[in-house]
Amino acid sequence: MSRSDFIWVDDEDHYQCPAGNLLQRNLRPFKTPRSGITKDNTTIYRASQHDCKDCEHKQRCCPNTLARKIARSIYEKSRGVAKAINQTEVFKKQSSAERKKVEMAFAHMKRNLNFHRLRLRGMKSANDECILTAMAQNLRKLARLCARSPPKHRISVPGT
């Protein structure tokens, strides 16, 4: 079973499995209070072994473990808002227009500036190479904008 098969109850801060059992943050009280947030900025929600042992969904849900656990990001609310915005037509139209600008710039870099592959190794060197190529592209744009076309007619100088 995937995480989407479980129901998130926001106001009570727990998941509910398809069999109706709860997956909670703290299954037992601790002497020293814990935040419950891992190094990966997630919170672990666990079902009790007693509930999972007798469940009819055990083979599909958690066949190799004693109980089911789900990691939930602390930024999950923000992700939900972003997903909702992402589904709107206005965002899709704006995103498409902005993505087209960036993709056209990369297409120009590949076709005209011979940027087909990175020649240097490592993230820092690859970043530097991309910046240098983008800088060359921006200088070409600047030269095109600032260049003046030559006069179309010949200027006659009096006395010659």
Image (tube, rainbow, N blue to C red):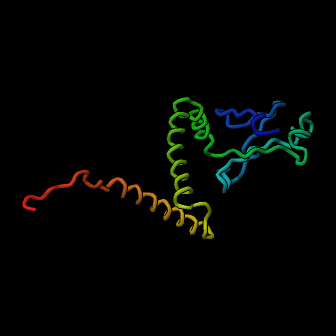
The picture quadrant where one finds residue 76 is top right
Q: Position of residue 35 (x, y in %)?
A: 64, 50
Q: Position of residue 29 (x, y in %)?
A: 73, 47
Relative placement, left or right, of 91 versus 145 is right
Q: Which residue reaches farthest front? A: 160
Q: Which residue reaches farthest left? A: 159
Relative placement, left or right, of 16 versus 54 is left
Q: Position of residue 117 (x, y in %)?
A: 62, 62
**Number of disc labels:** 0
Q: Position of residue 122 (x, y in %)?
A: 62, 69
Relative placement, left or right, of 103 versus 7 is left
- The answer to whether any part of residue 81 appears in the image is yes
- The answer to whether any part of residue 33 appears in the image is no
Q: Which residue is at a point 61% across and 60% down the rendered structure image?
A: 116
Quarter containing the C terminus: bottom left
Relative placement, left or right, of 19 versus 151 is right
The picture quadrant where one finds residue 59 is top right
The picture quadrant where one finds residue 125 is bottom right
Q: Nearer the viewer, residue 25 or 134?
A: 134
Q: Which residue is at a point 55% across and 64% down the rendered structure image?
A: 127
Q: Nearer the viewer, residue 114 or 131?
A: 114
Quarter containing the N terminus: top right
Q: Is residue 115 above or below residue 35?
A: below
Q: Nearer the viewer, residue 101 or 1?
A: 101
Q: Nearer the viewer, residue 16 or 25?
A: 16
Q: Is residue 33 above or below residue 51?
A: below
Q: Which residue is at a point 68% across and 54% down the rendered structure image?
A: 38
